[in-house]
Amino acid sequence: MHNNGTMIRTPSSSTFMAREARFGAANYRPLPVVLTRGEGAYLWDVEGKRYIDMMSAYSAVSFGHGHPRLLKVLSEQAARLALTSRAFHTDVLGTFMEALCKATGMDKVLPMNSGAEAVETAIKAARKWGHKVKRIPEGQARIIVAKGNFAGRTTTIISFSSEFQYQDGFGPLTPGFDAVPYGDARAFERAITRATAAILVEPIQGEGGIIVPPDGYLREVRALCDRHNVLMICDEVQTGLGRTGDLFAVDHDGVKPDAILLGKALGGGLLPVSAFTARAELMNVFNPGDHGSTFGGNPLAAAIATEALAVLRDEKLVERSAELGTHMMRRLKSIDHPAIRDVRGRGLLVGVDIDPAWCGGREFCERLLQGGVLTKETRESVVRLAPPLVIERQTLDDAIDLIETTLEGLQHPQRKTPAVEPLNA
Ligand SMILES: *Cc1c(COP(=O)(O)O)cnc(C)c1O
């Protein structure tokens, strides 16, 4: 049982944490808080303390916790029909697919569950398109990705990661990927060969540290994909569905890729729902038996995702994300504190890069936790601020206030050591 020492825990929290530690794999190191309830942009721990959720389960809870419309569909559809497998048709799947095609501007949908599965689906589609349509010799199709990417944790996906830890000990890795620096379209072009089937890229790198590429980056990628007959596949698992202030982050550049991958928020914060959406020419490489998933496209998931898309539109959450995001960015940028190295992002996906000499990202998040705000660092020093899109402006301001006071409470790095009690204490 490790406790960071700064926090006093009642027995109930520590009991839950100890049980997880005893019986669970150690593949996560959660912040020391035990949550039991959520509503809108708020979460409560087992001691009854309330927190503002500035993390949204890595953007999967865009609609807030327990959205009434989504809960209603969840219980009604669960009671009627939850799971059939794709061996049969249902009266909800086609409706979901149509709604998602309308939203993305794509022709067809292949539903899966986790984001990683959507990425795996894209990789299989791109390779098969490369071999059967572009006529790359069988088994030689390659996919170009950007360094700093995050696309999930399967053995194939970690094979194109640039994070040492994601790969360390997990080989043999899947071949067929090339990685170039993010944000430089020319780097993609230089890496293209006749064996290149696709470019797979995040419009904004989320887990990579909330990295926003230069304006026009995706437009250039689109143009070079057209020039070289290469597929442009955008991983919007994190950035999609209003997170960045546009319905899709590719909309910022006014670009239509050949495929868009969705996940996270698509499940309304209730279920894992993901999708590979693509132009017909690409999706048509799949024939019966080529690919599938027992749970992919199940009626419960389809009904919730359809309702999630409707809520997004009815509650104008995309506009809300843009507006609140601009407000949050303006406030954060106006904080004049030497520990802030950078504030970046778009819409309600923002990262505050904090100088580790002042405070590590993890420690900063633990301080926020004490003050009643929940979030998690990414890439060590970047504090992620990605609240549910339904968050009230006042709640968002409360969270930003706490970030300000937390910054003010940091000790200047040169005055940090040695740790001695002040004389007048
Ligand atoms: C989270 C994420 C994934 C993987 O989604 P899982 O549901 O965790 O498998 C893929 N791509 C991006 C950009 C993500 O942020």
Image (cartoon, grey):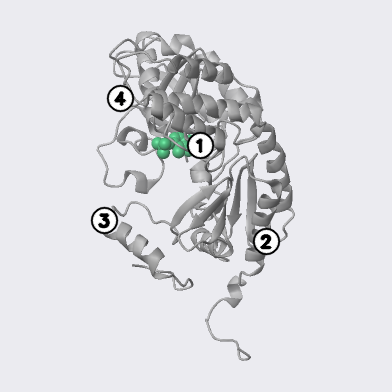
Q: Residue at x 50, y 35 (%)?
A: 71
Residue 370: x and y in percent read 54, 65
Instruction: Give how far apart the Cα atoms at labels 2 and 3 are.
Output: 38 Å
Say whether disc 2 or disc 3 marks the residue closer to the N-terminus: 3
Q: Residue at x 44, y 13 (%)?
A: 282
Instruction: Give how far apart the Cα atoms at labels 3 and 4 are.
Output: 28 Å
Report which residue position mark 1 lands on.
181
Residue 70: x and y in percent read 52, 33
Q: Nearer the viewer, mark 4 or mark 2?
A: 4
Could you tell whether 88 is left or right of 42 in the image? left
Report which residue position mark 4 lands on.
294
Give amino acid for label 4: Thr
Say whether disc 1 or disc 4 marks the residue closer to the N-terminus: 1
Give amino acid for label 2: Glu
Please identify the residue farthest to the bottom as the structure is shown.
423
Q: Secondary structure at mark 2?
A: helix
Could you tell whether 392 is left or right of 221 in the image? right
